[in-house]
Amino acid sequence: MAAGMNVIVMGCGRLGSRIAGILDSEGHSVTVLDVNESAFRRLPEGFHGKRAVGNGMDAHTLEKHGIQAADAFLAVTQGDNRNYFASQMAREVYGVKRVLCRIYDPVREDIFRDLGLETFSPTSFGAQIMVDMLRKEPGRK
């Protein structure tokens, strides 16, 4: 990962706040965008990044919070459609180089990946991890 990246994280839930904290601690410039101001309470103590209240599917909001200068955009809200739409805007309209999109539905993940997005499905990964755990004998690594 390039040093000193300018990153926008859309969604300040458990995952978004964790990602923002890690990137901030590594010295990246991080803007966290969420529709709910109370979500920012999840950010780690000492977080140096920006907190922005707004909808990441709204062009004005994205522009107001620096999408034109972003090196990366991560869409990690609870909604697959919101994440997809905002990711497509970041990539197609604003030309953000790295756009990562969380998608819960594995079928949609395949479709969105085929459309050129970098996707992550915790459902797919979680299922595989649980099956792998089941296949192993208890106590073995």
Image: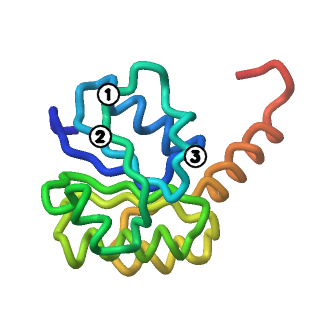
Q: Secondary structure at mark 3?
A: loop
Residue at (43, 66) in percent of width and height: 55
Query: Could you tell me if the residues under marks 2 and 1 are in contact, i.e. CB atoms within 8 Å?
Result: yes
Query: Could you tell me if the residues under marks 2 and 3 are in contact, i.e. CB atoms within 8 Å?
Result: no
Rendered image: mark on residue 30? 2
Rendering coords of residue 102 (x, y %): 51, 59
Q: Secondary structure at mark 2?
A: strand
Label 3: how many Cα within 10 Å (few below 14, some 14–19, many 20+):
some
**Is 108 left or right of 89, judged from the image as shown?**
right
User: Which quadrant of the structure image shows residue 73?
Assistant: bottom left
Q: Dot 1 corresponds to which residue?
A: 48
Classify 60 as above or below 78.
below
What's the amino acid at mark 3? Gly
Residue at (62, 64) in percent of width and height: 104
Work out how far the residue at label 2 is from the one at label 1, CA to CA, in angstroms.
8 Å
What's the amino acid at mark 2? Val
Classify 92 as above or below 95.
below
Q: Earlier in the sequence, mark 2 or mark 1?
A: 2
Quadrant assignment for the C terminus: top right
Q: Nearer the viewer, residue 46 or 97?
A: 46
Q: Nearer the viewer, residue 93 or 2?
A: 93
Q: Secondary structure at mark 1?
A: loop
Residue at (45, 76) in percent of width and height: 112
Rendering coords of residue 79 (x, y %): 59, 67
Residue at (62, 69) in percent of width and height: 106
Classify 73 as above or below 116.
above
